[in-house]
Image (spheres, helix red, strand yellow):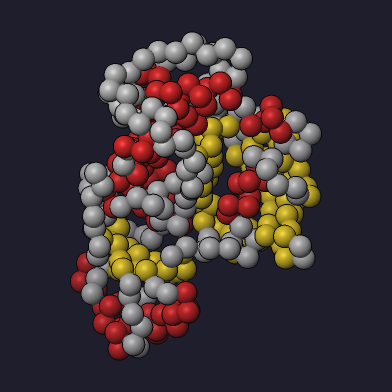
Amino acid sequence: MITITNLIMRFGRTPAVDDVSLSLDQGDAVALWGSNGAGKTTLIRCVLGLLRYRGTITVGGIDVRRNGKAARMLIGYVPQELGFYDELRVDSAICYFARLKGITNISPAVSLQGVGLAGNGGKRVRELSGGMKQRLALAIALLGDPPILVLDEVTASLDALGRHEFVGLLRQLTGSGRTLLFASHRLEEVRSLARRVAVLERGRLLRIDDCARFAPDAQHAAVLHLHLSADTRVPAIRALAAGGFSPTLNGTGILVPVSAEHKAAPFRILAEAQIAVDNFEVDAADHSSAPPVTGDRRRESSTPSDCEVTQ
């Protein structure tokens, strides 16, 4: 469904994506993994035809550079930063974006029910919580039933419970042959949604792993996601590696696979190295029924109507 061949995209002289090739068949699910600045968002924007690039990208056999509008009709896209008119009612927002897509005879009530927002059509967008706005964005992305979903760090602004619920919804929606390309720096999302993981660093594709190979092996009871300031991440990785752990960088800190008896050891090592941990999450090896535990957990916390949309 998506074929990327020798993709190069530069901002001035700086390569943001450097000679990347990647292919997704129908029903595939690929996570883009890498630290901030690795090129994940830039690659996604190239797939959407929003940036100029060198190389070739096709979506459903359509050349994105030559016919970007037709290619985008095959894609449902949810960005990291949502843009809604806050005073619109939720069902009106559905109708508005349907018009932009040229989709007729849509039912806001059906769209909202599909993402767990039934009964919220009469609310104004500003009344929705962050998690509910993400569900609304997903409902809009699914208008017209596109065969491809593209997501860019869509849970970055949600708390642990909100992320767990949203990822569960995505897992239900992508189990029916829909192709998924998404950027994430959260291991629990990758393990829940991806079949393969494309690891990017400074714009280059380092490798593509099967998800089972990429995720920590069964001997690890959990993965600590430690939020650290940017200038302490490399020293933290060195200190933890010297202590026998295998930490890796991600978008907001580092990931540390730990066994059941050594969950506290990384904190001791970092304290001895005088490296402060700003926040943390614990991603359990079996997290199918419970959200991750975090060090700073806060819970976020109308009449539907049909509309006929004309072009």
Residue at point 64%, 40% (across, down): 48
Q: Toward the viewer: 35 or 174?
A: 35
Q: Toward the viewer: 124 or 79?
A: 124
Q: Is residue 161 above or below residue 243?
A: above
Residue at point 35%, 88% (across, down): 273
Where residue 99 appears, as percent x and y from the top left, is 56, 21
**Left or right: 171 with respect to 12?**
left
Q: Toward the viewer: 174 or 260?
A: 174
Where residue 40 appears, as percent x and y from the top left, is 58, 54
Residue at point 42%, 37% (across, down): 86
For residue 148, say whether it is visible: yes
Residue at point 69%, 50% (across, down): 21
For residue 241, say whether it is visible: no
Q: Toward the viewer: 160 or 131?
A: 131
Q: Is residue 113 above or below residue 223?
A: above
**Left or right: 21 with respect to 78?**
right
Q: Quadrant of the C terminus?
A: top right
Say which quarter of the image contains residue 207: bottom right
- Residue closest to the far front: 87
**Left or right: 163 with respect to 198?**
left
Say which quarter of the image contains residue 71: top right
Q: Is residue 228 above or below residue 2?
A: below
Q: Is residue 100 above or below residue 297?
A: above
- Residue closest to the far left: 261
Q: Quadrant of the N terminus?
A: top right
Where residue 140 appears, as percent x and y from the top left, is 47, 29
